[in-house]
Image (cartoon, grey):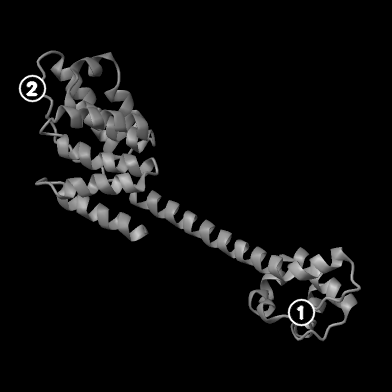
Amino acid sequence: MRCNEFQNLIDAYLQETINEPRREKFEEHFFQCRKCFLGLKLNEALQNKDVRITLEEKPRVFVLKLFKPLLVMSSLFLLILFSVLLVQQKRQTRLLLEISAFEIPPYHQGELRSIPENGATIEAKFSRAMKYLQERQFRPALNQLEGPLMEEAAYPKIEFFRAICYLGEDEADKAGEIFDAIIRAMDPAYFDEALYYKGFVLLRQGQKQAARDQFEKLAGMLSPMSMKASAMVKKIEAID
């Protein structure tokens, strides 16, 4: 049966005036054709549809006619439910990806001059890394911030921006480890910033509720980052 012939028989089928041979072809078609299946509002029509069964019919035919309307309604319901859930999941994933985009933290020239040994070299590498970072070139920035010289310095500012680079490179686990270390050390210069950007780590890891809790905790603190954290809480709640 073709789709146009199916469309012409919809009224006859719903009013039960269609003959048996055509009914079988009709039902066979809408089980095979998704477009016609969805177009026919069987979820309403079949609720009021009587299933006529004679005693002479074989058990197989009896069962088929008895349960086919229920199977049709169940299949339609599951198909619609799956489609809705899929759309919602895609929407939530897209929105989480959008709000997980972060601003580059500000950097002030000369903040590393207090380093006693190899200070000039470390500051020069750090400055080059910041230039790359402001252009969101995370990998070149990491190349400047990594290596024995920078690691031996163990300067919190270097560690913080190294974590930012990992976050920009979608290496959320590495970024999270560094932010956690800064938070545990409770360095007053970078503690709040580490708390804030740890929220973005959690978003990149798909932990929406944990990210919300992280931002909410910071929003309730006396912190220069509290307003930004509060804004992130609202963005996350808007996704629900």
Residue positioned 61% across, 61% down in the render = 78
Q: Is residue 51 left or right of residue 157?
A: right
Three-letter residue code for mark 2 = Ser
Q: Residues within 10 Å of mark 2 (few under 14, many from 20)?
A: few
- Count how many numbered circles sit on residues in the image: 2
Q: What residue appears at the point 28 percent right and 49 percent down from the top-left corner?
A: 212
Q: Judge by depth and name the residue closer to the eye, 196 or 212.
A: 212
Q: Earlier in the sequence, mark 1 or mark 2?
A: 1
Q: Are marks 1 and 2 in contact (CB under 8 Å)?
A: no
Q: CA distance from mark 1 to mark 2?
A: 81 Å
Image quarter (top left, top right, bottom left or bottom right) of the C terminus:
bottom left
Residue matched to label 1:
7
Q: Amino acid at mark 1?
A: Gln
Q: Position of residue 182 (x, y in %)?
A: 20, 29
User: In the image, is 71 to the left or to the right of 140?
Assistant: right
- Residue 213 percent location from the top left of the image: 26, 47
Q: Relative to 219, say whether 57 is above or below.
A: below
How far across and how far down the image is residue 12, in percent?
79, 85
Residue drawn at (30%, 43%), measured in percent from left and top? 200
Give residue 20's quadrant in the image.
bottom right
Q: Judging from the image, what secondary structure is the residue with disc 2 in?
A: loop
The quarter of the picture where the N terminus appears is bottom right
Q: Residue at x 69, y 77 (%)?
A: 46
Instruction: Tell me the residue that label 2 is attached to.
Output: 114
